[in-house]
Amino acid sequence: MTVKETKLQGCFVIEPTVFEDKRGYFFETFNRKNFKEATGLEIDFVQDNESYSTKAVLRGLHFQTGKYAQAKLIRVVKGNVLDIAVDLRKESATFGQCFSIELSEKNKNQLFIPRGFAHGFVVLSNTAIFSYKCDNYYNKASESGIIHNDQDLNINWKLPEEDLIISEKDKQLPTFKEFCHSEGI
Ligand SMILES: Cc1cn([C@H]2C[C@H](O)[C@@H](COP(=O)(O)OP(=O)(O)O[C@H]3O[C@@H](C)C(=O)[C@@H](O)[C@H]3O)O2)c(=O)[nH]c1=O
């Protein structure tokens, strides 16, 4: 397993060691001890999620607020997605900056996103199965987010805006400026 910290402190890209033989492949999708050794973080994951989406589905940018904030360990089981993490930690030197990475069935890369980030992804392949661990439970009342096409964040989603398939809930998300205002930033 290779672990590299991104330009956003505490946000890591993990390349697992994949064992291939005539039967197929094997790899560890999470190993608490190795993860701690490589990142210095002891994360207590409590919920695993999976979603299936078709091409151009965009989910995000999401986060849960306050004591319900979630760190996430993300991977793609089938297909290819562009995954985005946005640093919303007020005190961070990289506040407001984004990190993007393609996660796929083929590269098997994982992204660890700490608490205090917004997260979203768009599906680049015909279909995708997306899987992630969270270190805090889902809490509907704490759901929040930022609109995917925010002018300040200016994220390149790699697909034409008019092709994107987005939930009605996500279309109503506030802008980054509105988020900053609500946080007194
Ligand atoms: C996220 C979540 C949703 N749900 C329910 C609520 C709703 O009825 C249905 C679909 O929820 P959503 O539309 O919010 O699903 P989705 O848009 O896939 O939400 C996810 O997006 C990505 C980008 C993330 O980062 C995740 O943390 C999560 O917010 O599933 C749960 O029961 N538990 C959960 O943990």
Image (spheres, rainbow, N blue to C red):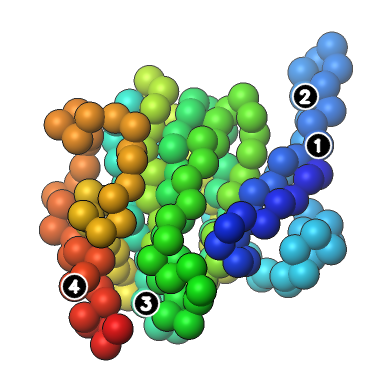
Q: Dot 2: within a 10 Å radius of its alpha carbon, few (fewer than 14), some, or many (20 or more) residues?
A: few
Horizontal side of residue 57 vs 88, given as left or right: left
**How far apart in space, not on screen, are marks 2 and 3 (Cα)?**
38 Å
Horizontal side of residue 117 vs 27, given as left or right: left
Position above or below: 115 against 112: below
Q: Nearer the viewer, mark 4 or mark 3?
A: 4
Q: Are marks 1 and 3 in contact (CB under 8 Å)?
A: no
Label annotation for residue 17: 1
Q: Dot 3: within a 10 Å radius of its alpha carbon, few (fewer than 14), some, or many (20 or more) residues?
A: some
Horizontal side of residue 167 vs 21, given as left or right: left
Q: Is residue 138 something that shows in the picture?
A: no
Q: Nearer the viewer, mark 2 or mark 1?
A: 1
Q: Amino acid at mark 2?
A: Tyr
Q: Are marks 2 and 1 in contact (CB under 8 Å)?
A: no
Q: Which residue is at a point 77% across and 18% down the rendered structure image?
A: 24
- Residue bearing the label numbered 4: 178
- Residue bearing the label numbered 3: 65
Identify the secondary structure beneath mark 3.
loop
**How far apart in space, not on screen, are marks 1 and 3 (Cα)?**
34 Å
**How far apart in space, not on screen, are marks 2 and 1 (Cα)?**
10 Å
Measuring from the top left, give residue 177's x and y in whole percent. Answer: 21, 70
Measuring from the top left, give residue 25's x and y in whole percent. Answer: 77, 24
The C terminus sits in image quarter: bottom left
Q: Which residue is at a point 80% across and 59% down the rendered structure image?
A: 38
Identify the secondary structure beneath mark 2.
strand
Label annotation for residue 36: none
Label annotation for residue 25: 2
Answer with mark 2 or mark 3, whichever residue precedes in sequence.
2
Measuring from the top left, give residue 19's x and y in whole percent. Answer: 84, 28
Q: Are marks 2 and 3 in contact (CB under 8 Å)?
A: no
